[in-house]
Structure formats: structure tokens, C-alpha cells
Amino acid sequence: MNPGKLFAASCVALVTTSMVFSIRGDIADALRGDFHITAEQLGTAFQPAFWGFTLSAIFGGSLVDFFGMRRLLLLSAFGYVAAVLAILFAPRPAAAVAPYYSDAGYQVLYGAMLMLGLAQGLVEGVINPLAATMYPKEKTHKLNVLHAWWPGGLIIGGLAAFLVTKMMGLDVAGVAGATATTGWQIKLGLILIPAVIYTIMIWNESFPATERVAAGISTGEMFRECLKPMFILWWICMWMTASTELGPDQWVPSLVTNLTGMQGILILVYTAGIMFLLRFFGGRLAHALSPMGLLTISAVLSAAGLFGLAGVSTPVQAFAAATIYGVGKTFFWPLMLGVTSERFPKSGALGLAIMGGTGNLAVAFILPVMGGWYDKFGAAATFRYIAILPVILIVIFGALYFYYKARGGYKAVEIGAAAGD
């Protein structure tokens, strides 16, 4: 086993996952035009990607110990390739179809988004327990570094999409329909590159048994760990942290363009850059400040940034508000996973899979809701409404901070010990 190579392959796999996210957001308006659907209908088409992510993350994470990490990671790469090809060759209607879901092209789009989600979930279901297993003494730090490549992939996908836009003149008024179609197809096809790369990297590599299996923790103990009251509270928080981070991300390119006239994908790339730097180089802040303290600060900044984005009208204002929001959302995902692994180690791959899957299930719910707000109330109101979630998180994380402080401070639980939660 080569831990360094497996960790690097995990990073590339996560880059693939987040490139899907940024490129899908960038081509949203082009897909609406080519498939003749509304923003809410497109949000509905995006929804199965997150349902699929949830299902495969949870079930894939549960079955990691039975099927093996290598097989599941290879299966994810196949899913990426198949889904991208399906969308590229999906039939497109000449005009709006009523009901919209009866159109064959829309059905292919819907099914391909489901397949993309299944592939993304398998990646999440494998790489988190893999990192926790290979680096048991540095779980939160390594998960922060690993998940730095989520924004890293957003940057790669976002900049690549922006470059294609500029090279093909896709942002020029009156661009020909055929050119616009070719543009989004090229952008989507870029996802195939990292999928092939990580396939090659893991093809002949051996993978370890998960930490839970190596420690001799039974499957029954694993399931019981996931039923503890504190785990359930943490699960509820994951709904809100994921919606706060990923819901706005998927709509930011379109919303910011609507509010300011600039290319909104640049805001997504900018906030992703902030996240990459902070996760990659600031991962140890979690235990310096305590995970709960850092999560509370993150919720405050996320709320402030989203309320700020609701009031922007110029690019300068957009970048200022996005800076606050970008810093705020940075540590949500890796800390939610890190705390899960540290406080509930007996939950093993299942606990991490439940959290990762729940995060994407939350986005599956919030995307069409945000699309509906966008259609009915406009871009500014969409940001204001979603900002309510981090306000709630301020209260919960703040309370947990004082809860752990009263008990002597936050501490990681050794897998052989009994947690008090």
C-alpha cells in the first residue's frame, strides 16, 4: 500500500467531483436555453444528482468493508464518464415541451444527473474513511487538506469554463445558438480528464481495511454509534451547513450575473480560492480554536456574507461580500466530517457516509427551493432567505462550544474508548 499515492488519488477524485459542481453551475443558463426549461425546472433536473450522491455515499460507505475501496472508486470513475457522455448526446427539443418532464431530452438529463450524483457519492463514501484510516492521529487535519481539493476543483473547473467562455465569445450578446451549445458541451467534457487520471492512479494499488474493521469494532456497534443523541444532533446540523455552503454555490454564477452584470463564475472561483488556501494551510486552526468555536465563527461570517450578497449591485460589492461568505463557509464540510470521525470513531465508514450523504441530500432539497425563490422573488431575496440557516447554526454551535467547555473542552475519542455523547 502506498498511502501518499492513495491520498493523492483521493484528491484528484474529489477534484472531479467539484469540477462537476462548478461546471454544472456555469452551464446552467445554457442548459435552460437548449432544453427550453425554467430555473425551477432545471433545479429539479439537478436534484437527482444530490439524491444519487446521498444514496451512493451512504450505501457505498456502508459497503466499503464488503466490496473494497478500490472497486467502488473505480466504479465512480465509470459513472462520471457515462453520465457526461449521456448529457452530451441527449436529444434537445426545438421548443418548450408541456409537461416538461415528458420530453426525452429532459429525461436523459435527469437520469444523467442521477448518475453523476451516484459517482460523486461513491467518491465521498471511499475517500473519507480512507483518509481517516491512513492517518488516525491526524484525522481532522488530513480531512481538511483532502477537502481543500473540493474548492481546488471548483477553481480548476471554474477557470476552465471561464477560459472557454472567453475563447469562444460566449459572453457576447447575440452569440449563435450552435456556438453556445458547443461551448457548454466542451466545458462539460473537461470533467472526463481527472476521472481518467485517478482511474490510472489506483488501477493496480492495494487499499487498507478501514479503521473500524482493523480495531475489531462490530457492525452492530457501528450502527449503535450512529443512534446516539449527539450524533443525531450533528446529523441535523449537517443539513444546514451543507445547504449554506453548497446551495448558494450552485446558483452563484447565475445570481451574481443577474445582480451585477459580471461573470458570476468568477465569484465562485474567488471564494473557492479562499477556501482552498484556508483548508490547505489553516487546517490546524480547528484544534487551536476548538472545532465548535471555529464552526460558530464560520456560521457568523456565512450569514453576514449571504446577507451582503443580497444587497450587491456592483462587482466590487460582490467580491467584498463574497470574501466574507467564502471565509465563513470554508471549514463547514471538513469539520463536520472531522468531528464525526473524532467524536464517533466507532461509526466508521458508515458515520462518515451518513454525514457526507446527508450533506448532499440537503442540497437536493434546497436547489429547487432556491430556483423557485429566484423565479418568483429575484436573486437578492434568494440570498437573504438562505442566510437564515447560518443564523440558526450560530445558536447551535455556540451552545455546543459552551457544552464541551463545561466538560473540560473538546477532545477526540479513541476508537477503543466509550464516548460520553
Image (cartoon, rainbow, N blue to C red):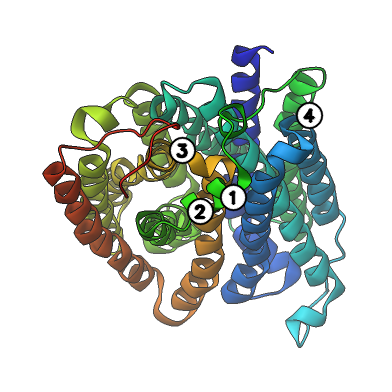
Q: Which mark is residue 164?
A: none
Label 4 and label 1: CA atoms lie apart by 37 Å
Identify the residue under disc 3: 345
Relative to residue 138, is residue 343 depicted above or below?
Answer: below
First in sequence: mark 3 or mark 1? 1
Relative to residue 283, is residue 386 depicted above or below?
Answer: below
What residue appears at the point 40 percent right and 45 percent down from the top-left corner? 336
Residue 121 visible in the current orientation? no
Rate crowding at label 3 as few (under 14), some (14 to 19) or many (20 or more) other CA atoms within 10 Å.
many
What residue appears at the point 39 percent right and 36 percent down from the top-left corner? 342
Kind of residue indicated by mark 1: Gly
Identify the residue under disc 1: 220
The answer to whether residue 170 is left or right of residue 280 is right
Q: 171 or 246, which is in the foreground?
A: 246
Q: Secondary structure at mark 1?
A: helix
Q: Secondary structure at mark 4?
A: helix
The answer to whether residue 43 is left or right of residue 303 is right
Identify the residue under disc 4: 196
Label 2 and label 1: CA atoms lie apart by 6 Å
Quarter in which the N terminus is drawn: top right
Residue 102 visible in the current orientation? yes
Rate crowding at label 1 as few (under 14), some (14 to 19) or many (20 or more) other CA atoms within 10 Å.
few
Q: Which mark is residue 224?
A: 2
Rate crowding at label 2 as few (under 14), some (14 to 19) or many (20 or more) other CA atoms within 10 Å.
few
Label 4 and label 3: CA atoms lie apart by 33 Å
Q: Nearer the viewer, mark 3 or mark 1?
A: 1
Q: Nearer the viewer, mark 4 or mark 3?
A: 3
Label 3 and label 2: CA atoms lie apart by 12 Å
What residue appears at the point 40 percent right and 80 percent down from the top-left corner? 377
Q: Position of residue 373 (x, y in %)?
A: 44, 76
Q: Nearer the viewer, mark 4 or mark 1?
A: 1
